[in-house]
């Protein structure tokens, strides 16, 4: 039976995820887990759809009992030098998120970057970097900031159809962050009933 285009693209995305997971730097992953376990409070940040991934990660951390917050929310407390900022940014150049990371560093906190760009302003700011593949060719071909690309409708991905509009990084970041949560569950011996107690019950 001939495959549907949706099946073909799902398989391509799955293959890309497997390939990049296989090439993930173990030292970077270990350092990221160590940072999460050591810091008093964890703040997450990202712009656009990367911001949605950050929010999902923050929620999962809360479900595991971590003191986690989303930067920009009205109830997010002040950041201190004992805290950790986790930033999701494919390009590492998004001005609004660079400013957040710079502020965290000036306060004396630690910054961890999850990215697909091997060199960027945020990469140079971060204490810990997790590299998810290498989309530098894509980002270097479009030097406009994330904000400008969004306003002009030029936020494109590696190809016009396969994982469009930066989707490949966001897909990788979501899979990576959920794998981190699974790892933390194992390391902390978290039980599902205990996690369920932390789920929202007002909806």
Image: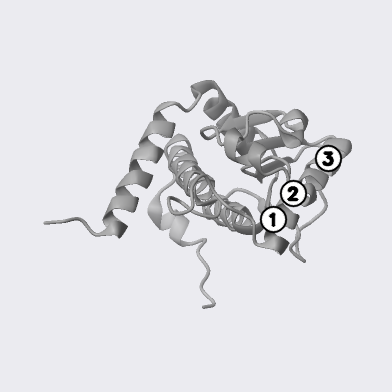
Q: Residue 155 in the image: x percent, y percent?
A: 62, 55
Front disc: 3 or 1: 1
Viewer can see residue 80: no
State yes or no: discs 2 and 3 in contact (Cβ < 8 Å): no
Q: Which mark is residue 98?
A: none
State yes or no: discs 2 and 1 in contact (Cβ < 8 Å): yes
Q: Which residue is mark 1?
A: 149
**Disc with the residue nearer the chain's start (2 vs 3):** 3
Separation of residues labelled 3 and 1 (CA atoms) = 22 Å
Front-most of 19 and 71?
19
Q: Secondary structure at mark 1?
A: helix
Q: Secondary structure at mark 3?
A: helix
Q: Which residue is mark 3?
A: 102
Q: Residue 133 in the image: x percent, y percent?
A: 51, 33
Separation of residues labelled 2 and 1 (CA atoms) = 6 Å
Residue with the most extreme bottom position: 203
Quadrant of the rendering where the N terminus is positioned: bottom left
State yes or no: discs 3 and 1 in contact (Cβ < 8 Å): no
What residue is at 53 percent from the left and 45 percent from the top? 169
Total of numbered circles in the picture?
A: 3
What residue is at 40 percent from the left and 49 percent from the top? 191
Judged left or right of residue 123, residue 135 is left
Residue with the most extreme top position: 27
Separation of residues labelled 2 and 3 (CA atoms) = 17 Å
Q: Secondary structure at mark 2?
A: loop
Q: Quadrant of residue 115?
A: top right
Few, some or many residues within 10 Å of mark 2 (<14, 14–19, 20+): some
Front disc: 2 or 3: 2
Front-most of 199 and 164?
164
Judged left or right of residue 5, residue 202 is right
Few, some or many residues within 10 Å of mark 1 (<14, 14–19, 20+): some
Q: Which mark is residue 145?
A: 2
């Amino acid at each position: 039976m001939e495959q549907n285009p949706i099946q073909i693209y799902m398989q391509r995305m799955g293959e890309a995820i497997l390939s990049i997971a296989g090439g993930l730097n173990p030292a970077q992953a270990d350092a990221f887990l160590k940072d999460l376990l050591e810091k008093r409070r964890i703040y997450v940040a990202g712009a656009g759809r990367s911001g949605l991934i950050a929010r999902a990660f923050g929620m999962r951390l809360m479900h595991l009992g971590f003191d986690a917050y989303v930067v920009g929310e009205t109830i997010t407390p002040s950041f201190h030098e004992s805290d950790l900022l986790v930033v999701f940014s494919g390009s590492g150049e998004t001005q609004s998120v660079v400013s957040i990371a710079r502020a965290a560093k000036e306060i004396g906190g630690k910054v961890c970057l999850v990215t697909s760009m091997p060199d960027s302003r945020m990469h140079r700011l971060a204490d810990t970097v997790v590299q998810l593949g290498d989309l530098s060719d894509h980002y270097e071909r479009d030097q406009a900031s994330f904000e400008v690309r969004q306003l002009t409708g030029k936020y494109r991905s590696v190809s016009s159809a396969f994982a469009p509009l930066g989707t490949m990084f966001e897909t990788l970041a979501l899979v990576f962050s959920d794998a981190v949560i699974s790892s933390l569950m194992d390391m902390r011996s978290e039980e599902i009933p205990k996690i369920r107690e932390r789920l929202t019950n007002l909806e």
